[in-house]
Image (cartoon, rainbow, N blue to C red):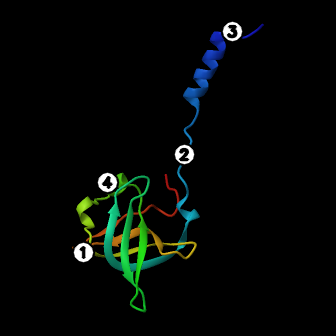
């Protein structure tokens, strides 16, 4: 017996309804060493509240007194907001200290964990090193 058009339609609908969603997010561990943290203190030059990751740029003086621009990646803007962050926490010109996971390639990038704000508060802006339920 040949399956009817209704049978095929029902089968397709059931497949769509029971399929699990595919996650398109990449692993933080691909670009950052989850075993190596680094801390930098610098002056905020910009903060982009965007998704999937917020981005902070800070100017940091190296050992020779030269200014280096560091990129600090955070989790999503929405996630940071839920952790207590507000857009006025990182004004241009403010001095902040960020501790996070160092870039695997040695570039001037951090995946931000704790950020000490000018008012003394410390906020968490990253994700856990491993997936937890």
Picture quarter containing residue 88? bottom left
Secondary structure beneath label 3: loop
First along the sequence among labels 1 and 2? 2
Residue under label 1:
118
The residue sitting at 55% across, 58% down in the picture is 27
Tell me: residue 29, above or below residue 20. below
Tell me the tag on residue 4: 3
Marks 4 and 2, how far apart at CA: 22 Å
The residue sitting at 56% across, 64% down in the picture is 29
Marks 3 and 4, how far apart at CA: 51 Å
Q: Residue furthest front?
A: 66
Tell me: residue 44, above or below residue 127. below
Left or right: 31, with 60 as reference point: right
Q: Position of residue 47 (x, y in %)?
A: 33, 64
Secondary structure beneath label 1: loop
Q: Position of residue 22 (x, y in %)?
A: 57, 42
First along the sequence among labels 3 and 2? 3
First along the sequence among labels 1 and 3? 3
Label 3–label 4 contact, CB within 8 A: no
Q: Position of residue 3 (x, y in %)?
A: 72, 11
Between 7 and 95, the residue placed more toward the observer is 95
Picture quarter containing residue 124? bottom left
Q: Nearer the viewer, mark 4 or mark 2?
A: 2
Marks 1 and 3, how far apart at CA: 69 Å
First along the sequence among labels 4 and 2? 2
Secondary structure beneath label 4: helix
Between 104 and 60, the residue placed more toward the observer is 60
Tell me the tag on residue 23: 2
In the rendered picture of this protein, how many numbered marks are placed on residues?
4
Residue under label 4:
82
Secondary structure beneath label 2: loop
The residue sitting at 44% across, 53% down in the picture is 52
């Amino acid at each position: 017996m040949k399956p009817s058009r209704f049978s095929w339609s029902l089968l397709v609908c059931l497949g769509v309804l029971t399929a699990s969603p595919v996650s398109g997010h990449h692993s933080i561990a691909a670009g950052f060493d989850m075993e190596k943290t680094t801390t930098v203190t610098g002056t905020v030059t910009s903060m982009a509240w965007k998704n999937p990751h917020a981005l902070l740029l800070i100017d940091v003086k190296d050992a020779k007194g030269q200014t280096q621009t560091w990129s600090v990646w955070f989790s999503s803007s929405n996630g940071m907001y839920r952790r207590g962050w507000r857009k006025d926490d990182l004004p241009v010109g403010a001095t902040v200290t960020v501790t996070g996971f160092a870039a695997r390639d040695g570039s001037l990038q951090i995946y931000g964990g704790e950020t000490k704000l000018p008012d003394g508060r410390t906020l968490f802006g990253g994700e856990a090193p491993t997936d937890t339920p």
